[in-house]
Image (tube, rainbow, N blue to C red):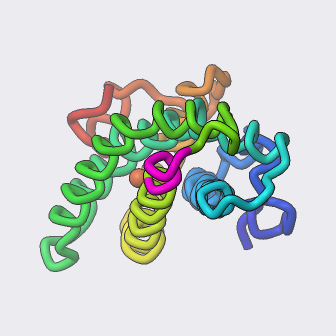
Amino acid sequence: MTSHARDPRRGDCRSPTPPRLLSDPLGVLHEDHLRERHVCAILDRLAAGETVARRDLDQAAGFLGTELALHIADEEADLFPLLRRRCAPEDEIAPVLVRLEADHLHAGVDTPGIVAAVRAGPDRLDATGREGLRRYANHARRHLILENAIVLPFARLRLAPGDLETLGGRMMRRRGIMAPTVARDAGDAADSGPETWE
Ligand SMILES: [Fe+2]
Ligand SMILES: [Fe+2]
């Protein structure tokens, strides 16, 4: 059982993903997906005109404004290149990753406006704003389905222990957390890591 599965409170969007989970990088990515799904539910409630607590709005804006960019970087700079290298041709992972990268591009464009709408709160939302929230949440959920159903299972199947160790180290360094025992330089991982690593 992974560490994220031992904590039933996770996925509630209450706090950033804890560094301890970076020893289980795929668990961290799954954890982020749970939190993103929770944020989508907040966006739905806001779009529906329901009362949403300021605390929930702040947490949703915090996740979308800060953590989502880190999560996308984890996937695009580290996980996806590893999958391209490790998956077999019959896995047919390449078109899935292209689709997900296109989603990330759209998210990069749309997310600042969504964060601004969430921070402004329900009183400032018009019909166009509510539709924007709904559309953003629906796109995000479709993205999460693909990643949870295809990307993470292939990662668990195809990545070697050394890949996971390097992935976790790079995720820690991306967050400014020192990980001297696991964070290898890209050059050190040249025989096992993707060529496009930063
Ligand atoms: Fe993701
Ligand atoms: Fe993603």
Q: What span is colored magenta in the figure?
A: 126-131
- The quarter of the displayed image where residue 86 is located: bottom left
Residue 155 shows in this picture = no
Horizontal side of residue 146 vs 4, given as left or right? left
Q: Nearer the viewer, residue 165 or 91?
A: 91
- The residue located at (58%, 43%) in the rendering is 125
Q: Position of residue 2 (x, y in %)?
A: 71, 66
Position of 118 with respect to 98 (left or right) is right
Quarter of the figure with the C terminus? top left
Q: Is residue 47 above or below residue 1?
A: above
Q: Position of residue 47 (x, y in %)?
A: 59, 57
**Label total for image:** 0
Answer above or below: position of 168 versus 5.
above
Q: Is 69 situated left or right of 98 in this image? A: right
Residue 171 image position (x, y, % from top left): 54, 36
Name the residue: 28% across, 47% down. 81
**Residue 91: percent from left, percent from top:** 22, 76
Compared to residue 68, the image places residue 163 above or below, namely below
> Left of 77 or right of it: where is 172?
right
